[in-house]
């Protein structure tokens, strides 16, 4: 009689089977670089394709374009109208990140393609970044750190005095989830807070300004927290920056496209603005060379949501959207639902 236990023990270990969650309706396509663990999961668990960035892209799209029904991308890359035209069976564009301004949502909507992002899970970290950047910019901590490291303290003595944050007047462009989290944090610093949005928020405890220029003229610090895209392109233009004036500071944790970067660089260099804290730029990762030597400017490489916990939560929500789309045709945190499920 065969000893069942021994037989089990001696059996060849089963080769690990890839968990393929790819939809029977089509393939998943990764567009642009993603968090390495997310890219790995897409490849191993979803058998995802990766859109080439070299000259092989047209041939790749001619071969595989018809089979793709879900794209996973980020706000850094997105899906434009031309790429959508090469993916005729696309059903959903799933973004890692809250911003989706690089995707043509209008065209996606017309074509019935759903679009999702990862809101809420990054709100705290982006708001924390805004506060850190604001304090650093007004108090000159990064510049003071450079001063100490360069051995200048013993030779030159004290650094110049800086601007007080607590109790200052702050204007927020875009009082959405992130803008509100920034405002609520600053309320704890005793700041006087106002905001500008397309529309006034009924019942908001913060003062509404009807235009970005009116807001800028009435505050010490202007914080940009509005989403990027066509609707906010250079919303903070030269006239708004001039209204902020030589004593005013600009903080941007949203998108470089929301501000006229040329005017910003000119005004920072010529004393037209007191300073700026920038986590985002018009042409990332390129930063205007004129800013690199200015001590009244703090420059960050788009780190707003960049903590392990938040990026893991963004990854989980990205995959939740993809799984839900594959299983049911709907998106968990939809900007626009796929047409098949729109009411
Ligand atoms: C993202 C961002 O982490 O979510 C966004 O819109 O700007 C960032 O915080 C980054 O863009 C992901 O690629």
Image (cartoon, grey):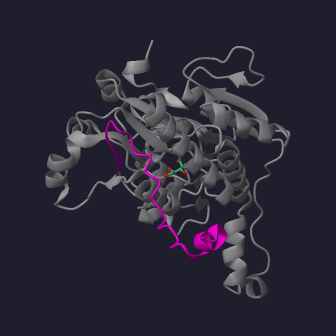
Describe residue 240's horizontal placement relative to residue 205 as left or right. left
19 lies above or below 223: below
Residue at x-position 56% and y-position 50%: 315
Q: Quadrant of residue 152?
A: bottom right
199 lies above or below 137: above
- Say which quadrant the C terminus sits in: top left
> x and y percent of residue 199 in the render?
58, 17
Describe residue 320's horizontal placement relative to residue 290 as left or right. right
The magenta segment is: 1-30
> x and y percent of residue 307 in the render?
65, 58
264 lies above or below 155: above
100 lies above or below 266: above
Residue at x-position 70% and y-position 33%: 180
Check the image and name the residue furthest to the front: 1
Residue at x-position 78% and y-position 41%: 186
Q: Nearer the viewer, residue 192 or 71?
A: 71
Q: Nearer the viewer, residue 197 or 44?
A: 44
> x and y percent of residue 209 in the render?
63, 23
Q: Nearer the viewer, residue 123 or 264?
A: 123
Q: Quadrant of residue 154?
A: bottom right
Answer whether residue 23 is magenta in the image. Answer: yes
């Amino acid at each position: 009689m065969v000893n069942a236990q021994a037989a089990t023990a001696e059996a060849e270990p089963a080769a690990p089977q890839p968990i393929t969650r790819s939809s029977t309706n089509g393939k998943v396509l990764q567009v642009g670089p993603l968090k390495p663990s997310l890219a790995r999961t897409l490849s191993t668990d979803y058998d995802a394709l990766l859109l080439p960035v070299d000259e092989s892209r047209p041939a790749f799209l001619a071969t595989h374009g018809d089979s793709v029904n879900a794209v996973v991308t980020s706000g850094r890359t997105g899906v434009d109208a031309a790429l959508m035209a090469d993916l005729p069976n696309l059903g959903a564009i799933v973004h890692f990140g809250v911003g989706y301004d690089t995707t043509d949502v209008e065209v996606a909507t017309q074509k019935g393609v759903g679009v999702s992002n990862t809101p809420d899970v990054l709100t705290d970290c982006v708001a924390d970044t805004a506060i850190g950047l604001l304090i650093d910019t007004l108090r000159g901590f990064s510049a003071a750190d450079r001063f100490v490291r360069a051995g200048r303290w013993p030779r030159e003595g004290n650094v110049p005095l800086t601007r007080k944050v607590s109790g200052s007047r702050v204007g927020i462009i875009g009082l959405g989830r992130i803008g509100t989290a920034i405002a609520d944090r600053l309320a704890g610093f005793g700041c006087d807070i106002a905001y500008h949005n397309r529309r006034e928020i009924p019942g908001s405890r913060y003062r509404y300004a009807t235009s970005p220029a009116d807001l800028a003229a009435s505050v010490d610090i202007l914080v940009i927290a509005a989403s990027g895209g066509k609707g906010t392109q250079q919303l903070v233009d030269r006239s708004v920056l001039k209204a902020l004036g030589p004593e005013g500071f600009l903080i941007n944790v949203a998108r470089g496209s929301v501000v006229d970067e040329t005017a910003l660089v000119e005004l920072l260099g010529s004393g037209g603005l007191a300073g700026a804290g920038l986590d985002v730029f018009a042409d990332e990762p390129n930063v205007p060379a004129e800013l690199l030597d200015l001590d009244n400017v703090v420059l960050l490489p788009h780190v707003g949501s960049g903590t392990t916990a938040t990026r893991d939560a963004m990854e989980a929500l990205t995959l939740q959207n993809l799984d839900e789309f594959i299983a049911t045709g709907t998106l968990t945190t939809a900007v626009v639902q796929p047409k098949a499920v729109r009411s």
